[in-house]
Image (spheres, rainbow, N blue to C red):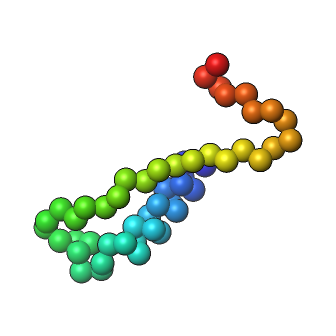
Amino acid sequence: MPLRCLEYVTRIYEEIVPVKKRYAEKIYKIPNPDFYVVYVGDKDYIPEDE
């Protein structure tokens, strides 16, 4: 799952950052990713940290 999230984020960043600025010497600001997990199962969800 973490590898899949990384793949999604890199695809989004490819669209956000222009090609000419990808290898620039200056820092290019990009938004921080937010990850959400959506549970759609039939059973009640029990968090692992409880």
What is the residue that sits farthest to the top in this orientation? 50
Q: Quadrant of residue 39?
A: top right
Residue 6 horizontal/vertical position (percent) = 49, 56
Judged left or right of residue 27, residue 8 is right
What is the residue that sits farthest to the left in this orientation? 25
Eyeballing the image, is 50 above or below 9? above
Residue 13 horizontal/vertical position (percent) = 40, 67
Residue 1 horizontal/vertical position (percent) = 60, 49
Residue 24 horizontal/vertical position (percent) = 17, 71
Query: Which residue is drawn at the image coordinates 22% and 65% (left, top)?
Result: 28
Quadrant the C terminus occupies: top right
Judged left or right of residue 31, residue 39 is right
Eyeballing the image, is 26 above or below 3? below
Query: Which residue is drawn at the image coordinates 41% and 75% (left, top)?
Result: 15
What is the residue that sits farthest to the bottom in this orientation? 20
What is the residue that sits farthest to the right in this orientation? 42
Counting labels gives: 0
Q: Quadrant of residue 18?
A: bottom left
Query: Which residue is drawn at the image coordinates 54% and 54% (left, top)?
Result: 5
